[in-house]
Amino acid sequence: MPTLRLLPELEEALRQVPGIRAASVVTGPDAVPTEIHIVAGRAKGAKQVVRDVQSVAMAGYDIDIDHRIVSVVQFDDDLDQAGGTDQAPMVIRLPDTPATDAGHVDLAPRPLIASITVRTAGTEADASVVVKTGDASYDGRSIGPSTMSHRHTLIARATLDAVSELLGLPAEVEFVLVSTMGARRMAACVIQVAVPGIGELVLTGSALVRSDEADAVARAVLDALNRRLAG
């Protein structure tokens, strides 16, 4: 799918903000921003740059920007001057991400599946999923019919419930499937995320079945959400 940039006037407005050197606004076919990439100096912190982006979009174009879609690359101020190989290395700082040593970014670890438990009692099943990120654990749960056809959905919902605090946005499982592709078994899912001011964001994820379909379903949910969770 080609990259769409249907808001050139917003890009130009962002380039006029003090400290911003370049701006690229990626949109969907409806001209709603899905990604905003900013190159800026280091006179302001990355969070302030993101707030400037949100203010310009809202005040000038009535567009409410979710900070999660904005990425900021910051250069040392002396890189504006012409120079050769003696230029300082680029430093990348992401919003809400603390920087460590120069040239490095301390990214939060991606969530991983710690355990999956499914208990059945008559016609009802109770799926529990534990997700770990670093030293923190998050529990999720979903209850529903105990039929095999519904069990994958329960596991996907429990996984989504476990990461709901990390995601910070309303979301639901639209579709889950485990099928054979060639010689491989694969789990796939579709997740709907409600983004304030933007609308419905549809995310897809997939994971190969290693030894257990339940584990693959849970990993497919994380695969769909990992970019949002890392943002």
Image (tube, rainbow, N blue to C red):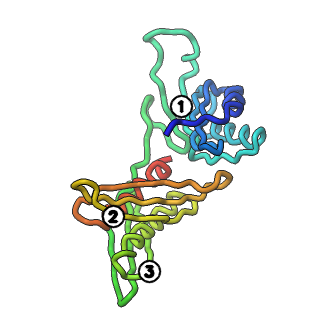
**Spatial distance from mark 1 to mark 2, Cα to Cα?**
39 Å
Residue that label 1 marks: 73
Secondary structure at badge 1 equals strand
**Residue at 31% over, 67% down:** 214
**Residue at 66% over, 46% down:** 65
Question: At which x and y percent is residue 19?
Answer: 65, 26
In this picture, is 83 found above or below 56? above
**Spatial distance from mark 3 to mark 1, Cα to Cα?**
45 Å
Question: At which x and y percent is residue 107?
Answer: 43, 43
Q: Which quarter of the figure has residue 219? A: bottom left
> Few, some or many C-alpha atoms within 10 Å of disc 1 (few <14, some 14-19, many ≥20)?
some
Secondary structure at badge 3 equals strand
Q: Which quarter of the figure has residue 123? A: bottom left
Q: Nearer the viewer, mark 3 or mark 1?
A: 3
The residue nearer to you, when weighing 221 against 99, is 221
The amino acid sitting under disc 3 is Gly
The amino acid sitting under disc 2 is Val
- Residue at far bottom of view: 122
Question: At which x and y percent is residue 64?
Answer: 69, 47
In the image, taking residue 113 as reference, residue 166 lies left or right, namely right
**Spatial distance from mark 2 to mark 3, Cα to Cα?**
19 Å
